[in-house]
Image: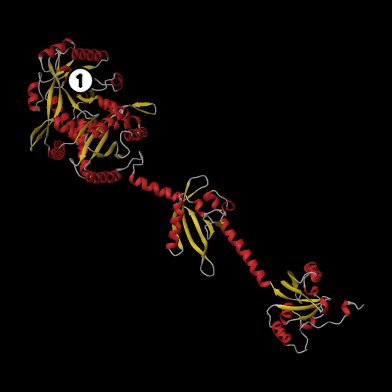
Amino acid sequence: MTHPEREPIAAAPEFDEAGHGSGQFFRFVVDNAIDGFFVIDKLRRFIEVNEALCRMFGYARDEMLGKTPLDFVAEESHVELIAQIQRIDSTEHRRYRLLGQRKNGSTFPIFLNNTTFHGPGGAVAGSFGFVTDLTSLVEAEQAVVASERELQGILDNMQDTYYRTDVDGRIVRLSPSAEKLLGYAPEQAIGKSLADFYFDPRDRESFLKTLAASGGSISGYESCLRHRDGHEVWVLTNAHYLRDGEGRVIGIEGTTRDITERRRSEARIEFLAHHDPLTELPNRLLLRDRLERAIAQGERTDTRVALLFVDLDRFKTVNDSLGHPVGDRLLREAAQRLCECVREMDTVGRHGGDEFLIVLTELRDNDAVTRVAEYVLAAMSVPFSLDGHDVAISCSVGVAIFPADGRNFDELLKKSDIAMYHAKEAGRNAFRYYTERMNIDALERLDLQNRLRRGLEQGEFVLHYQPVVELATNRIVGAEALVRWNSPDGGLVAPGRFIPVAEECGLIVPLGDWVLGEACRQLRRWHDAGHARLYMAVNLSAIQFRRGSVEESVIRALRDSGADPGSLELELTESILLQGAEHVLASVRQLKGLGVRLSIDDFGTGYSSLAYLKRFAVDKLKIDQSFVRDLPADADNAAIVRAVIQMATSLNLRVVAEGVESEQAVQHLRELQCDYVQGYHLGRPVPADEFRALIA
């Protein structure tokens, strides 16, 4: 038997030169093919190769003929190739990948498409096939893998969330940042519908419509998604359609950024633009809008709208005595109570400071307004528990009604403010409706303020002096300085008319300074005239303690006049001692250090306390005229006066009874061992010249 390697090489089928046309055509096709072509005989030797195969492996045609495929593959592919060759008898078509080896020793990937052919009688004669160089394909695959790896690296590190869906809206790719955004790892979300992540499914439809209307690409689209734990996540999305080679939409690709904090910040800024940061109530800007909307509704439905101006009484006392943090808590709790007094359709807002506004809408009559005002007064009268302190306050409420009192916010605000001041003048803890008389009063008050300011500048004020008599000697021992305004526009203006206005607008401070200076100058004149025992009493306003520097004013008045400090008596009200006690105590100690004397005016009408009498080291009490006027006929008042005198005696304090208008009262007070008396029965307030005649 002839050895296979020594048998002659048979001719390739169809490639003989017998003149068959099909053979010529086949040769033409094979020689011009891009892929390599080969034919091997039954001994597994190449009996035909084309030029493409020769170029692929780097051999001449003669060098390849007669050799086996094993001579042209890398060693690591020998096992696979042998296995495929052994299947030549049983499998007609085989396709497999190998690692080819060129003449220069370099290797490259190849793909074989091999077919068995049979000779006469049906025996296997060999096989033929095509070889494809896979170098470019493998490089492309590697590039794709590298590109995919690079893309995944980018996705792994990007803060925004990348997503891609198929044409049905199911997620097919998701970056890892989705877990932070929505609480789902990518593998948990892939396959889900994008619609599953919208907080409101209608938002998904809105997104798709917007994307379609924009031509398939949108930027900066804001929507609300649902986190896995249920909370809202606001996102900013850029997205576009994915299309195939024919332009058909096959999905959506986009990036999503979490803007929840930005939205919260914007919402907070928007809230603060229309709300008070302390109480979180609507501010004046939002109140104006609500009221004007309510007025427009009222015009359509023929209903009324009410604006209530609420001012907390004595709030400054709380701030000064307990501190601003407690004051802020009081404002917040007061705001909450006010909200509980109204309907949901009404609005409670903070106007500023301790002032609140309430808008009541769709009213058919004023009865509902009255009820709300009464609710407010009752709510504010319940003591507030603040940091261990039970704080009792009240409020004053002014009411203006649309359309009777005004047809816009500014008119109603002005008139409700006026009404509120009338409630305060009525004793606080009250409400008042606006009337035209109130408006006239407000205009008169404004005119009075202007005239007061001009009067101070032009020296229109004078002092009158009321004598103080010592009961033991029946001698005038002192004088109380009382300011009078000699206005060129209206003659002599009563103090009860202009003093409250001066306190309200702050003019009481310069006016009080002038009174101190003029009284000290007059005291010095009397002393120089031989009345050295005479003392001068001057009233101080609470406003002077809060807004001015009383100590500096007294020092300046004494220095400029040369008056004896021991002959100056400063009259304080009980309210001064109770408001801002520490600040007042420091001022009082400085005044006492100057040598001046202190007395408590209108004693018994305020919150009388033995503690502050000792703490502030006062020298004298002035019993209010309301207890003295009807002596001795009024038994209750007589008992009060007796008790005050006995208490003062035990505390080594002197007592002055003011408002004495009869000899019977003088005698009764003498019997009670009162020290001093003052009143119309003993002498009215008179100018300095007339007073000099009295003491002469």
Which residue is drawn at the image coordinates 31% and 29% (left, top)? Answer: 379
Indicate the secondary structure of the residue bearing disc 1.
Answer: strand
Question: How many marks are shown on the rendered structure?
Answer: 1
Which residue is drawn at the image coordinates 29% and 21% (left, top)? Answer: 612
* Quarter residue 621 falls in: top left
Q: Nearer the viewer, residue 86 or 573?
A: 86
Q: Position of residue 94 (x, y in %)?
A: 74, 70
Question: In the shown orientation, is residue 590 left or right of residue 479?
Answer: right
* Quarter residue 244 falls in: bottom right
Dot 1: within a 10 Å radius of its alpha carbon, few (fewer than 14), some, or many (20 or more) residues? many
Question: In the shown orientation, is residue 249 left or right of residue 469?
Answer: right
Q: Position of residue 285 (x, y in %)?
A: 29, 46
Looking at the image, can residue 6 be seen?
A: yes
Q: Residue furthest right?
A: 1
Q: Position of residue 180 (x, y in %)?
A: 54, 50
* Quarter residue 87 falls in: bottom right
Per the image, the residue denoted by label 1 is 622
Q: Residue furthest top?
A: 671
Q: What's the amino acid at mark 1? A: Lys
Q: Nearer the viewer, residue 405 or 519?
A: 405
Colour approach in the figure: secondary structure
Q: Nearer the viewer, residue 201 or 336?
A: 201
Q: Residue furthest front?
A: 121
Q: Position of residue 181 (x, y in %)?
A: 52, 50
Image: 644 above or below 272: above
- The quadrant of the rendering that contains the C terminus is top left
- The quadrant of the rendering that contains the N terminus is bottom right
Question: In the shown orientation, is residue 138 left or right of residue 246?
Answer: right
Image: 445 above or below 534: below
